[in-house]
Amino acid sequence: MTSFEQKQLCSRFVKPEKLADLRTKQEIELMNGRPWTRQLPPPPVLPPYGLLEKISGRLEAFSYESFREYFDVKAYRTSTLPTISDGQRAGAAAAAIAAGSPGVGAVIMAESESSNDTAEYVQGIINGRAFRGWVGITRLQEGDDVEMVAEWQHDHYEVYAIALPKERIVSIIPKCDMGHNAHLLWRAKNMFILAGILLSMFNGVCLIRFLLEGGEGGFWEYYGFPIFIMLCGDLLFSGGIAYFAYRACAPTRCKLAEEIFRLLGMKNASKVNLNKITKKREQRLMDEGKWHDPGDKNKPACPSGKFIYSGESWFYY
């Protein structure tokens, strides 16, 4: 196995270290007067201080390190924090998992500040100038022709996305995968899923109680009104989560995502959902007989819409 293949294997299947934990260890070591020689990358610069630009060129140098870092709303200087507490999210996630929907539970808990994404801190040189920044998984090497979305900061480009235009693959800063309209639809869908799960659980409890009491009379006669009240409460609860989360994400994650999409030449940036685009591209490759399993070590690594690869932050576009 070549060093490049080993790099891909590690990026995909070896869990990276959590950067917050490493920073804590560094502080403890320095406070105790012990040496710390490992160079840790800085936190992501969110949002950019100025205008982003697209840079096209060949990578003259490239290196990376994989970590788990926080990229959600509270990492943005301009964020308006949602009022839904982590405790409330944990309760809703537990209910979803108990109902057999761990995916929904994961979505809910993703709003917690404790959520961290796998990302690569990349550094290198393009067109004679240094660049560095946070993006998703890459399979870049020196000599690759790329397009970069970045901001010039005094002595380097701060990178927010790197694309391989020939393959229509982009590695993007985590959480910036949807425009605001696409994000709104995603929130609405999850709102109804969560409300349905909670209502189903309540209906199940009512049915069990009805049967234990002998099952006499009409079920809806006794439980119709409580179920209606529960439905209203579920919609208010799940709708509140969706509303406050969307309000926080639209001017932060979604705004940055739309700037990146426009610079990459994507139309209707507010409606772009890179997850959907990736799934459609995968299906087209399957139909054409050109698809290979993303985990195949004998083939080039590639983005995937499969759930197991959903946290990699690289996509077809």
Image (spheres, rainbow, N blue to C red):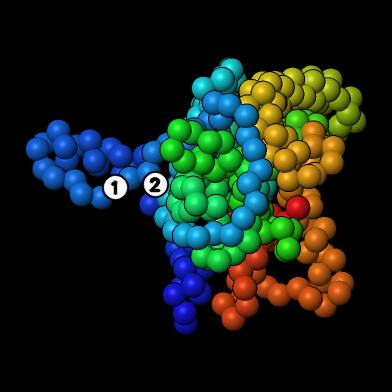
Mark 1 crowd level (few <14, some 14–19, many ≥20, 10 Å Cα): few
| Residue located 73% across and 63% down the image | 166
The answer to whether residue 317 of the structure is visible from this angle is yes
| Position in image of residue 293 (x %, y %) | 68, 73
User: Disc 2 and disc 1: Cα gap in Å?
Assistant: 14 Å
Judged from this view, the residue extending furthest toward the front is 128
Give left or right: position of 185 versus 20. right
Give left or right: position of 92 versus 264. left
Residue assigned mark 1 = 39
Classify 214 as above or below 170: above
| Position in image of residue 304 (x %, y %) | 69, 61
Q: Using the image, tell me which numbered label, if any, was put on residue 18.
A: 2
Label tally = 2
Q: Quadrant of residue 213?
A: top right
Q: Using the image, tell me which numbered label, if any, was put on residue 120.
A: none
Tag 1 or tag 2, which sits nearer the N-term? 2
Q: Looking at the picture, which amino acid does disc 1 mark?
A: Gln
The answer to whether residue 200 of the structure is visible from this angle is no
Give left or right: position of 57 versus 119. right
Q: Quadrant of residue 138?
A: bottom right
Mark 2 crowd level (few <14, some 14–19, many ≥20, 10 Å Cα): some
Classify 89 as above or below 212: above
Q: In which quarter of the image is residue 195?
A: top right
Q: Looking at the picture, which amino acid does disc 2 mark?
A: Lys
| Position in image of residue 87 (x %, y %) | 51, 27
| Residue located 70% across and 34% down the image | 259
Give left or right: position of 236 versus 175. right
